[in-house]
Image (tube, grey):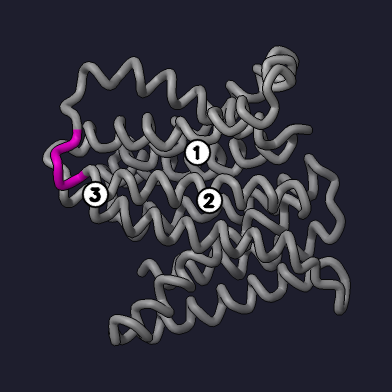
Amino acid sequence: MSDPLLATVLALISALMHASWNAAVKSGTDRLTQMGMVDATALVVCAAAAPFVAPPNKEAWLFLGISTVLNTAFRLCMIKAYQLGDFGQMYPIMRGVPPLAVAVISVVALHQSLTALAWTGVALISAGVVSLVLSNKLGAIRVLPVTYAVLAGLAIAGYTASDAGGVHAATSLLGYLVYLFLIESIPIPALALAARKRAAFTYVRHNWKLGLFGGVNALLSYSLILVALSLAPAAKVEALRETSVVLAAGIGALVFKEAFGRNRVLSSIVVAAGIVLMSV
């Protein structure tokens, strides 16, 4: 198998795994503890790996701290979005907001210009997200879950920018990634234990398989995308990964039996197309 073809396969598998671990969080009856189990899986794996990698250098720790705060904010907003809204609606909004936020910051704050393709992508993402917001029925906007989804998307944009800075500041990429996953995987399990106390252990005992499934998918999704990035241009890989937006809409319709499935799949295709154009 050629490198470009292997990268395509890995990126598509990563997209499915990314949508799958989010679906695992959505399917839990206690989503805080469910997310805690997903993070606990990454915590155990990275704690085992940490002694074998170089710890981050001094310059990288600031980015690690910022990313951990923003990742925790993202997780908390995502949990609330999934508690209050449909998976096929919330996930595409969360994935569509970051490129829009980056475009706004680039133009307004950094005074950078966008290409015609990028502007077309902005228009498509905007249209797709608005369509998703209005996808319940005409005039029925569920403000609270949409707000949490938008905030989660903004947090994604923030920690992505921070991680980009951290990767450049770090002397060891592998060390930075292992410690990043290790540290950012601590807050949610700790919050779940503090908030749920004994009930958290009861929930884990009955739902550990789903938590392990989510955790393994979360780790493998990111690992596969890193391998794909080493085999093919970043723009192509990231564009393929955004098929997770369409997959999530399909999961919402087929697995969770959510209404307006066809409309949300179409809107998600528009969002994914816009992200692809912005990454070209």
Tell which circle, 3 or 1, labels the residue nearer the N-terminal end. 1
Q: Amino acid at mark 2?
A: Phe
Whole-Å distance between the Cαs marked 2 and 3? 18 Å
Q: Residue 266: in sight, yes or no?
A: yes
**Could you tell me which residue is drawn at 68 percent across and 68 percent down?**
267
Q: Is residue 83 above or below residue 119?
A: above
- Residue 13 numbered mark, or none: 1
Tell which circle, 2 or 1, labels the residue nearer the N-terminal end. 1
Tell which circle, 2 or 3, labels the residue nearer the N-terminal end. 2
Q: Which residues are magenta?
A: 56-60
Q: Residues within 10 Å of mark 2 (few under 14, many from 20)?
A: many
Front-most of 54 and 90? 54
Front-most of 28 and 218? 28
**Could you tell me which residue is drawn at 84 percent across and 66 percent down?**
136
* Residue identifier under label 3: 166
Q: Amino acid at mark 3?
A: Gly
Percent of width and height locating residue 55: 19, 29
Q: Nearer the viewer, mark 2 or mark 1?
A: 2
Verify whether residue 57 appears in magenta.
yes
Q: Is residue 116 above or below residue 191?
A: below
**Could you tell me which residue is drawn at 16 percent across and 43 percent down?**
170
Q: Is residue 4 left or right of residue 220?
A: left
Q: Residue 207: in sight, yes or no?
A: no
Q: Amino acid at mark 1?
A: Ile
Percent of width and height locating residue 187: 49, 35
* Residue identifier under label 2: 74
Whole-Å distance between the Cαs marked 2 and 1? 23 Å
Q: Secondary structure at mark 2?
A: helix
